[in-house]
Image (cartoon, rainbow, N blue to C red):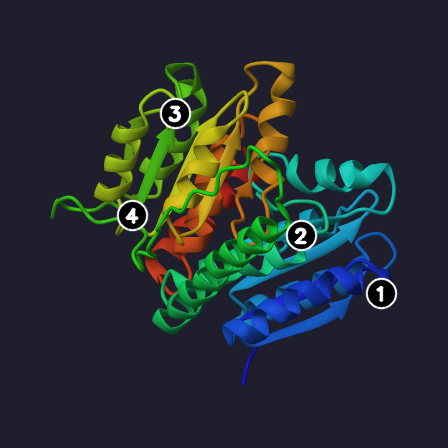
């Protein structure tokens, strides 16, 4: 049995974060392997593991590191497969590792998840594999159902503790929809749905669509806000139910990504935009997701890297797209 996911730790001290990922991958029934290799102290070891694993069929890399956390970036420099970065809180509450993981230059995207979120890193990696693997998608649906029941159970425990004189206990029935949302029509579905939260995000979105055009990847672009028009947003998510993945582009509180993951089990790539606070607010709102609902967060305003990451995900098992992606990356290296 060959591994589909390669986990690389920058240090053995990061194993407690890797354990969260391992537990998810065991549940998903996805073969994986794990190695300790430092981007700085054992650079050649990292390069050897990544190149050999890429050639031997590993589909997704999971880089877990703290401090300067260059490990996910070095992995991305040596493969055309998707790289998920999990920053670890060693110093500075993990913000140093987060920025080192997510703020990658154009051409080498890393899909960052929240600090210490090994479980979300593994769920995202599973979603990527699930684009082509029906059994993994089924396991993801089962896991999402378990999260639903956990929240319901937690609410019941809290209700038992509430004894206030004016507390009114309401009962709201909610059913699980296995497809999360009902598809509205039978129109032709593109590979990717791109959702921008505002017309101010369009310049970043154009970086994404420009590269997708070069790679001959089909997409739909919609400017719609789940805050200002929630019903239209839900309707659009229904129309795009069968896309392979989503790219959400927004600034400020960046509710778009959170709303998208609420409606889908497909991979969601998030691009924070620098509307205020240089995009720092949007970055944190996207990346710091709770367990079970990861967002593959890209660097601020890096719409191009979002397209490249999406292409890496879709190129798994697609030789034609893989060739196009490699050619585009080589041209970028020499430009």
State the residue position of label 4: 191
As drawn, the label of residue 230 is: none
- Whether label 1 touches label 2, CB < 8 Å: no
Residue 45 screen position, x and y as percent: 78, 65
Tell me the distance, in whole angstroms, between the alpha carbons under discs 2 and 3: 30 Å
State the residue position of label 3: 206
User: Mark 1 falls on what kind of element?
Assistant: helix
Mark 1 is surrounded, within 10 Å at the Cα level, by few (under 14), some (14 to 19) or many (20 or more) other residues, namely some
State the residue position of label 1: 12
Tell me the distance, in whole angstroms, between the alpha carbons under discs 1 and 2: 17 Å
Q: In front: 67, or 108?
A: 67
Judged by depth in the image, the label closer to the viewer, 4 or 3, is 4
User: Mark 2 falls on what kind of element?
Assistant: loop
- Whether label 4 touches label 2, CB < 8 Å: no
The quadrant of the picture occupied by the N terminus is: bottom right
Going by the image, does 311 lie left or right of 44?
left
Q: Earlier in the sequence, mark 4 or mark 1?
A: 1
Going by the image, does 212 lie left or right of 155?
left
Judged by depth in the image, the label closer to the viewer, 4 or 2, is 2
Tell me the distance, in whole angstroms, between the alpha carbons under discs 3 and 1: 41 Å
Q: Identify the residue at image location x=32%, y=40%.
A: 193
Q: Earlier in the sequence, mark 2 or mark 3?
A: 2
State the residue position of label 2: 117
Q: In front: 182, or 130?
A: 182
Q: Earlier in the sequence, mark 4 or mark 3?
A: 4
Tell me the distance, in whole angstroms, between the alpha carbons under discs 4 and 2: 28 Å
Q: Earlier in the sequence, mark 3 or mark 1?
A: 1
264 versus 283 height, above or below:
below
Judged by depth in the image, the label closer to the viewer, 1 or 2, is 2
User: Mark 3 falls on what kind of element?
Assistant: helix
Residue 219 screen position, x and y as percent: 28, 39
């Amino acid at each position: 049995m060959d591994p589909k996911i390669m986990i690389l730790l920058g240090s053995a001290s990061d194993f407690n974060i890797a354990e969260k990922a391992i537990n998810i991958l065991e549940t998903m029934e996805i073969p994986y392997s794990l190695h300790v290799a430092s981007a700085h102290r054992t650079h050649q070891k990292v390069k050897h593991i990544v190149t050999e694993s890429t050639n031997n069929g590993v589909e997704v890399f999971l880089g877990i590191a703290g401090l300067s956390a260059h490990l996910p970036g070095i992995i991305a420099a040596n493969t055309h497969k998707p790289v998920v970065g999990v920053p670890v809180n060693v110093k500075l509450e993990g913000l140093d590792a987060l920025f080192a993981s997510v703020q990658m230059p154009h051409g080498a995207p890393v899909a960052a998840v929240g600090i210490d979120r090994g479980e979300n890193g593994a769920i995202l990696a599973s979603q990527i594999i699930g684009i082509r693997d029906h059994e993994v998608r089924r396991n993801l649906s089962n896991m999402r159902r378990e999260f639903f029941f956990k929240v319901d159970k937690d609410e019941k425990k809290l209700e038992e503790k509430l004894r206030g004189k004016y507390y009114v206990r309401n009962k709201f029935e909610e059913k699980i929809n296995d497809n999360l949302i009902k598809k509205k029509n039978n129109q032709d579905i593109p590979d990717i749905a791109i959702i921008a939260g505002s017309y101010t995000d369009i310049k970043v979105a154009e970086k994404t669509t420009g590269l997708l055009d070069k790679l001959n990847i089909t997409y739909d672009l919609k400017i719609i806000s789940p805050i200002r028009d929630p019903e239209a947003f839900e309707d659009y998510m229904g129309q795009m139910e069968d896309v392979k993945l989503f790219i959400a582009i927004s600034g400020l509180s960046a509710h778009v990504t959170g709303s998208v993951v609420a409606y889908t089990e497909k991979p969601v790539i998030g691009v924070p935009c620098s509307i205020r606070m240089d995009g720092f607010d949007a970055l944190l709102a996207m990346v710091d997701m709770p367990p079970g609902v990861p967002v593959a967060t890209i660097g601020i305003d890096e719409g191009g890297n979002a397209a490249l990451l999406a292409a890496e995900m879709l190129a798994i098992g697609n030789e034609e797209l893989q060739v196009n992606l490699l050619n585009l990356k080589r041209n970028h290296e020499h430009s």
